[in-house]
Amino acid sequence: MNEINSLRKEFTKKDVALKILRSLPERWDIFIVMFQNTKDLSSISSEQLFSELRAHEFDLNRRKSTATEFAPEEPST
């Protein structure tokens, strides 16, 4: 955020949110599309956006650990 502020240009909340979302890796594409379609980017703060991203990442990690926990074991050869 400091780097954006150092450009001495005023960015709207929507501009900042879009820049953050565009910087995410490809594996976040589904979340980005969903987020853009359900949230008002012109009113969301960067803190709120980061909170949403952290919550989504936590949920992804939880699902991944649950999936590996219940995955069937492969037969040993």
Image (cartoon, rainbow, N blue to C red):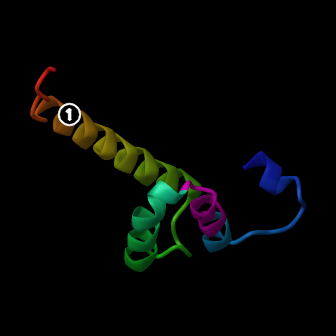
**Residue 18 within the magenta-colored segment of the rendering:** yes
The residue segment tinted magenta is 17-25
Residue drawn at (40%, 63%) of the image: 31
Magenta segment, principal secondary structure?
A: helix
Q: Which residue is mark 1?
A: 68
Snapshot quadrant of residue 64: top left
Image x and y of residue 25, in percent: 55, 54
Considering only vertical position in the picture, is 47 above or below 74?
A: below
Label 1 crowding class (10 Å Cα cut-off): few <14, some 14-19, many 20+? few
- Seen from the viewer's position, the closer of residues 20 and 75 is 75
Asked if residue 12 is among those painted magenta in the image, a careful observer would answer no
Residue 41 lies, with reference to residue 62, above or below; the image says below
Circle 1: element type: helix
Depth check: 35 or 68 in front? 68
Residue at x-position 42% and y-position 69%:
35
x, y (%) of residue 54? 43, 44
- In the displayed structure, does residue 71 sit left or right of residue 62? left
Amino acid type indicated by mark 1: Thr
Task: Identify the residue at horizontal 88%, vertical 52% (top origin).
Answer: 6
